[in-house]
Image (cartoon, rainbow, N blue to C red):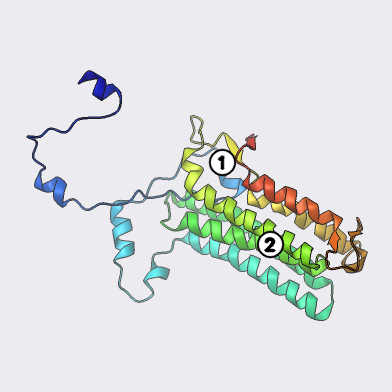
Amino acid sequence: MAEAYTSGYKPHNDTAVVSDAESDAEFVPELKLRRSSSLFSLSSNHEPLPRPEPKDYQNFLHDDRHFSLVRNLHMADFITLLNGFSGFYSIISCLRFALTGKSHYVQRAHFFICLGLFFDFFDGRVARLRNKASLMGQELDSLADLISFSVSPAIIAFAIGFRSTLDTLILSFWVLCGLTRLARFNISTNNIPKDSTGKSQYFEGLPVPTNLIWVVVMATLVYQDKILDKLPGGVFFEGTSFELHKIAFFFILQGCGEISKSLKIPKP
């Protein structure tokens, strides 16, 4: 019997009777903390937010009032939605550049990505000031980050000149790596080793907001008017179906860094 317990197996008592309270108890899934997928939350030294109460989860699922979804959003959730809005408006600005050729629209796209970064920082601060976790916070953060820091930069890259078939496939790979990275974060964040304050000890792969490095690079290219046919670095197989900008290989490296599990970047 001792060996069974040390191995992790606990034998059932054949004479035990399950109580009515145990058999009738309703199963409540484990509730997630509001954890942003951004650089800011992972670098936070604050204690984790308190978990939502099980009744909050049940009230959310069984709320049949009109506009119940909006009623159950927290203030931090609305700020996260502004992050998603900023990313979408950045995409709209790129489309306007494609239609008009006016470079100030690309500059506006860069501005809205930076605005999204501000909202990504601010939503976590508001949640901590109110000391209240959101049921949908983590999922909203991930989806908003995907729009603002993965899809939007890829659209900007396409708009300023990475338009060949192979360029587009590489940009698609880059976005899908960001999508996969965010999905992995949502399921693995609680398993990353923490220090005594609850702070994660390292980043598992490059965080998606590191794509902002490309935003800075592309903003510089726009400012120097080195876009479209003037992109630096040259082109492989120019004029053929396999035309490819040499700089595009760095998008592949960035994407591989995001989905890498062996790449563990120590946190400061």
Q: Nearer the viewer, residue 163 or 116?
A: 163
Q: Is residue 118 something that shows in the picture?
A: no
Question: What residue is shown at x 72% (from left), y 54% (from top)?
Answer: 212
At label 1, counting other C-alpha atoms closer than 10 Å, the crowd grade (few under 14, some 14-19, many 20 or more) is some
Instruction: Give the label, 2 or 1, closer to the camera.
Output: 2
Question: What residue is shown at x 92% (from left), y 64% (from top)?
Answer: 230
Q: Position of residue 108 (x, y in %)?
A: 76, 68
Q: Which residue is mark 2?
A: 172
Tell me which numbered mark, 2 or 1, is placed earlier along the sequence.
1
Query: SS for tag 1?
Result: loop
Question: What residue is shown at x 69% (from left), y 68% (from top)?
Answer: 90
- From this view, report whether residue 12 is shown above or below residue 62: above
- As drawn, the label of residue 104 is none
- Residue 44, by quadrant, is top right
- From this view, report whether residue 64 is shown above or below residue 125: below
Which residue is most to the front? 241
Inspect the image, locate mark 1, and give the three-letter code of the amino acid beneath it.
Ser
Find out whether the residues at labels 2 and 1 contact each other: C-beta distance under 8 Å: no
Q: Nearer the viewer, residue 38 or 259?
A: 259
- From this view, report whether residue 112 is shown above or below residue 250: below
Q: Nearer the viewer, residue 225 or 251?
A: 251
Indicate left or right for 101 with 58 as reference. right
Query: SS for tag 2?
Result: helix
Q: Position of residue 168 (x, y in %)?
A: 75, 65
Count the marks.
Answer: 2
Inspect the image, locate mark 2, and give the three-letter code of the amino acid beneath it.
Ser
Q: Which residue is mark 1?
A: 44
Question: What residue is shown at x 39% (from left), y 74% (from top)?
Answer: 67
Indicate left or right for 102 with 50 as reference. right
At label 2, counting other C-alpha atoms closer than 10 Å, the crowd grade (few under 14, some 14-19, many 20 or more) is some
The quadrant of the image that shows the C terminus is top right
